[in-house]
Image (spheres, grey):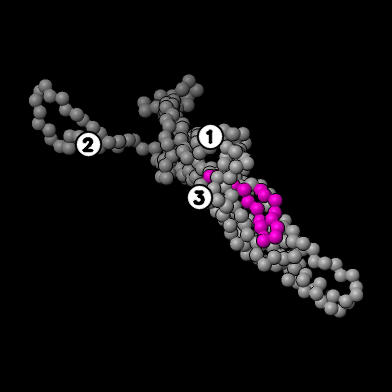
Amino acid sequence: NVLYLSSYLARLVRPFSAVEPVPATVLTPATQDIVAGVDTPVRLDVEVQGRVPESVELVLTRRDPNDANESSGQAERIRMTPTTNADGKTSFTATKSFDAACRLEYRFETPDVRSDPHAIRVCELPSIQRVVAKVFPPPVPEEDGDRNADGAPAVQAIQPYEQEVTDQPLAVLPHSRVEFEAQASMPMREAVVVGPDGQPRVQSLDGADHFGFEVTADQPSSIQLSGTSMDGLTSSETKEVKSAVKADEPPQFKLVSPEGDYLTTDVASVPIAFEV
């Protein structure tokens, strides 16, 4: 220990001088209360002042969520790794992850001293569970070629429809307006929508578990969705919403049932099914 050595040498060289004793060990956590996500590594550091101990242990104790003063299980002890920076300051480090939501208390200990305890709250990470698209196709010209009073071609509106977004691109007609509604796994503080231009757009949700946005489908695109929970945790993965522009072609029909010629009586009921 450098402090012990320097104090020892000072007493040898100047036996009658007033040499300050080595100060006692002081453990100073680099973090206070922590909120962490499930399966997310948490790094815990403690700085040491005064006498540097040979070892420091991280002590983790699970707490009963219904009683802040009661522990629920034996403490877990983790031997920490020492490091010394360029200024000669020593700290100890440990990394830990948790596989389920829980509440814990952590502190640092040596055989002679312990730090003040602090809390760790482990929470589920938010995710985007479901996205539904409401598609508003553009109007199409009337088949009979009629014109309006001003001479412009008459158009026919197409009814909007809803479709759940999957891993496959959402195929829509060119210039369709698409309203997306995203459902999150928990109440959210905010949502982030990264559009085809790559620019993030932040929506404040204030505890809502869903949010919406809309686009006009002029070309194939990819949109990334993520969010931040009320606990301040961000999504570990983004939700991708892909869209594609399809040609405006007449529908194609395929007879599914019956598969071929069908012999029946004049009063029989024959099920007929088409695939569009």
Please give the residue where the numbered disc 3 appears in the rendered image: 99
Where the N terminus falls, by quadrant? bottom right
Which label sits in the foreground, 2 or 3?
Answer: 3
Which circle's residue, 2 or 1, is located before the other in the chain?
Answer: 1
Are the residues tagged 3 and 1 within 8 Å (C-beta)? Answer: no
Bin the neighbour count of mark 2 within 10 Å (Cα to Cα): few under 14, some 14-19, many 20 and up. Answer: few
Picture coordinates of residue 221 (x, y %)?
49, 45
Q: Residue 50 magenta-drawn?
A: no
Q: Nearer the viewer, residue 14 or 82?
A: 14
Q: Residue 111 magenta-drawn?
A: yes
Range of magenta residues: 101-118
Q: Amino acid at mark 2?
A: Val
Q: Nearer the viewer, residue 251 or 222?
A: 222
Asked if residue 228 can be seen in this view, the reply is no
What residue is at 58 percent from the left and 59 percent from the top?
A: 78
Q: Amino acid at mark 3?
A: Asp
Q: Of the numbered discs in the image, which one, if any, rests on residue 256?
A: 2
Please give the residue where the numbered disc 1 appears in the rendered image: 210
